[in-house]
Amino acid sequence: MQAGNVFGVTIETPAGPPTAHQAPSERTHHGDTVTDEYAWLMNKEDPATVAYLEAENAWTDTATAHLAGLREKAFQEIKDRTQETDLSVPGRKGGYWYYTRTEEGKQYGIQCRVPVRPGETAPPVDEQRAGEEVLLDGNVLAEGKEFFSLGTFDISPDGNWLAYSTDFSGDERFTLRVKDLRTGEVLADEIPDTFYGSAWSGDGRVLFYITVDEAWRPDTVHRHVVGAPVGDDVVVYREADERFWVGVELTRSEKFIVIDAQSKITSEVRIIPADTPDAEPVLVAERQQGVEYQIEHHGHRFLILHNRDAEDFAVAYTSVDAPGEWVELIAHQPGTRLESVDAFARHIVISLRKDGLTGLRVMCDGSTDTYDMDFPEPLYSVGLSGNPEYDTATVRIGYTSLVTPESVFDVDLVTRSMTLRKQKPVLGGYDPADYEQFREWATAPDGTRVPISIVTRKGVVRDGSAPAVIYGYGSYEHSIDPYFSIARLSLLDRGVVYAIAHVRGGGEMGRRWYEDGKMLAKKNTFTDFVACAEALVRNRWTAADRLVARGGSAGGLLMGAIANLAPEAFAGIVAEVPFVDPLTSILDPSLPLTVTEWEEWGNPLESAEVYAYMKAYSPYENVAKLPYSKILAVTSLNDTRVMYHEPAKWVARLRATVPDGQFLLKTEMGAGHAGPSGRYDSWREEAFVLAWILDTVGAAGV
């Protein structure tokens, strides 16, 4: 090894990529014996594992050293386009406006509030005014820490207490604390190993919170009396079925504590009156396999969004006093997927998607008349934003598109007028008119039409010469809707076409779209993506040797699968925290998330059919002597959702199988699933990926 210097840090420069040689392991299921020569990398505590990951990082540094200048340039472009000192549009709750500030040079946001002035109805936008109270400063909390993440941030109904939780490693195991906002004192109430989510009682005396089991599954709701010993906390509900996660929240009306238990396909909800937090939870409707529902309190009734005999969901209601029969309110309409229902004192707002686009529908209380909010662009994303106040006729929405920065509007639900409160600043003279967005369609092998969203800088010639990036996800009914990105401008301004493939397994086209890309139909996700890539080439947006695919987490599984399925269709693949060894993970119920995932992927322990199907598409199981494109895998050591060893094993096997391939692994040694936590660190991570993409598509010198 030779000494080198990267960004001022001295490292040992390897002459070549590391190799992984330790004893292999074997597993046998359904008569099939598999040898895993890299299973030893699963031992995070083994110094040899850490040394190997650090050697991979050193090799990646060496292999990308020529991009150091481009990385710095891309980072500076992101930074220069971002208004570093800024504040969010304040939202009202009770007698305060709440908002988040950022300051130039600081990594994390600062949570603040100011009192509402007499007669004030509109938020004080872009005004850091006298009387500001700093509730929580992430920069102070993160001081001296390599990683920082805020889990819960929950103000009590009376505004006197703040419950907040912190994670300093990236493993999403949070420590919960309580702060007295009247004195600034952080109480001795310190609760380790908690999960996201909490709920206050109506009087702010009691706090409900969640803990996890050994498999990192949130399974227990506790009740804590503020100021009392944590050892006195009471278990309110514990979920025994390992398929289910639990959650807890306070309704917008602040009348009920809601405890929900959800698997991938089944739901069950219990409620506790917020004014009597010691009461036993009351069941709204007993769980029924395959039926999902969620509730929203609205006056004398609970609104129920459900899929009982309604694939794309319908809305019913039941009595608050005696939950029982469901009375239809909004009938099921195939092709219009109802995603959530938000209740306000005199209105109901339904979030939906139709024809691949999101939408908002308003219903006035006491009437079945509805209207849909209208938006001007052909491609966009819209949704409710915050809205903690129940007794209001004005709601806040967030709106964005591939060319329109994130925008915040207040909508008068009576007059239907929309007031723009703020659009995210993009410095450096950004003009949306300089860019164009398009909707294309690809045809999958089974004839299904798959939508593609595309954005380019105006003037890009469609002759196949432009470089391009195609992004995909395609799992959990999670939709990748059109959105604006400051970092993406570093690609677009260099002539790169950016596309999003809305493949099956996501929710873009409704519940059936999701069902047709999961379990024993999972391969549709992969063939859809390849069809989208081929459509971009066929329609002259780009060429295969100038196209990079990108995806993360379950989208990283997609990246690994298409690497095996169509290795010559891409010049490069970026796989971030990629789920590339799914069969090994789903076979191990002791790992975090595994049991809950069986309703998404199938249970290969019990089913030989599922086992064979997953083995047939698992990226790690199907590495072969193929003409692979360049691959960049990015992961984090403390990720509890997709373990670091999946991409580590994958890259090791790729390199051993195709020694002349170009495969890189980059591991964040102090982060979790979302990567680095500070905004500047995140920008540097993104700049690293952008530089690699530009180099791969031949646009590094642009």
Image (tube, rainbow, N blue to C red):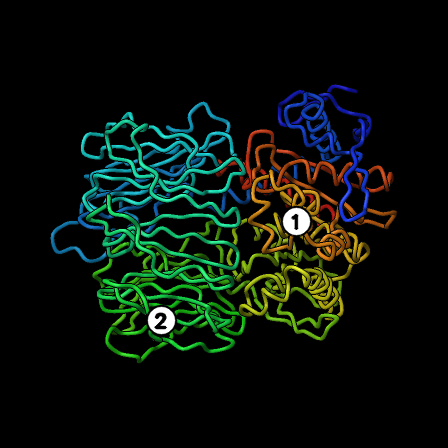
State left or right for residue 378 relative to residue 260.
Answer: right
The kind of secondary structure element at disc 1 is helix
Which residue occupies 69% across, 51% down?
604
Q: Position of residue 324 (x, y in %)?
A: 32, 66
Q: Which mark is residue 316?
A: 2
The residue depicted at 86 percent of the width and 42 percent of the height is 658
Q: Which part of the image, by quadrant, shows the N terminus? A: top right
Sequence-wise first label, 1 or 2: 2
Is residue 125 shown left or right of residue 46? left
Q: Secondary structure at mark 2?
A: strand
Residue 125 appears in the rendering: no
Disc 1 residue type (three-letter): Gly
Q: Is residue 156 above or below residue 304?
A: above
**Residue 302 visible here:** yes
Q: Nearer the viewer, mark 1 or mark 2?
A: 2
Judging by the rendered image, the residue that carries numbered circle 1 is: 556
How many numbered badges does the structure rendering display?
Answer: 2
Of residues 531 and 679, which is closer to you in this image?
531
Up the image or down, 308 lies above or below 50; here it is: below
Amino acid residing under circle 2? Ala
